[in-house]
Amino acid sequence: MKNIIGIATALCCLLIGQGAFAQGPPITADKPIMLGEGSWVVKTLTEINVAEQGTYTYAPIMVHYIVKPNILVGVHAPFTHYSFEDAQGNEAGGHFGDLRLLGKYQFLRKDQMGKTFRMVAKTIQNLPTGPDRIFAGERHGAYSGYYGIVAGYEYIKYGISSEVGYQWVPEYNNDALRVKLGFGLPLLKPVYPVNQLNLYFEYASNWEPETGNYRLQYAQGIQYAKNRLTVEASVRVPLAQKVGDGMRYRYGILLGTRYIF
């Protein structure tokens, strides 16, 4: 009997460690669960954002590497395209956007039979390699540092992720407090190798204390994971917002893929 329990516990921990336990990573939020040491993840999440001032497309190539079971580093290299309308007329073009450097450290992990809870400290350093502009209240083309905490609880039947962080923009008055909350619902039974269809219900708020600008958004997403490949799509809409004239967000369409090496 003890051997059976030991084997079941080991299998459960294996599924958790491989990310197959309940569902894949959230689409618009983040997740504190990391893969095995030495793993590479190559992913993209193209965002087509539509606001009063026009359309802004953000298409990054993201490469993540798990240095140790509790340490992850990554680089995000984006291509952006914009089509704006303002008082001076129409403006359109494409360019390389701001390069982003990511670091995550998992400082808490509690695994139990059929469930796990984890927390990570996270930073994103935004380097101003793209042109300086504001779209839908967000600053681009300026250095900024993001510092936050991500927490996640995952159970066989559902997953919950949350994040609280502060965006520091030293050259401008666009510092922001950011809060995210997401719920994942797997539609298929958990198996290994992974074969899972997930629904995601995700909320995100952004408040700038210096300007008073505020935005609360909701994203409804669907994700399919098969072995090492994940494909996903989401629609994002504003629930509440207080921003400058012409900066109101209308909707966004997100399309992504992820592959694990």
Image: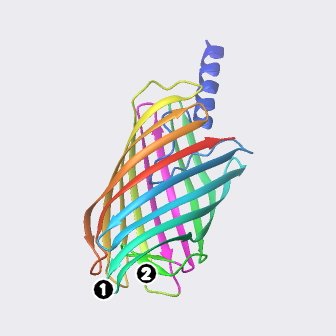
The residue that appears at 44% across and 32% down in the rendered structure is: 197
- Badge 1 is on which residue? 87
Left or right: 131, with 246 as reference point: right
Choose the circle earlier in sequence order: 2 or 1. Answer: 1
Distance in Å between CA atoms under marks 2 and 1: 23 Å
| Residue drawn at 49 percent across, 62 percent down | 58
Where is residue 234? Give x, y as percent. Answer: 39, 48
Q: Which mark is residue 174?
A: 2
Q: Quadrant of residue 180?
A: bottom left
Q: At label 2, which amino acid type do we have? A: Asn
User: Which region shows up in magenta?
Assistant: 141-170
Residue plotted at (34% across, 86% down): 88
Amino acid type assigned to the residue bearing label 1 in the image:
Ala
111 or 156: nearer the viewer: 156
Residue 27 drawn at (x, y percent): 46, 49
Vertically, is 102 above or below 232? below
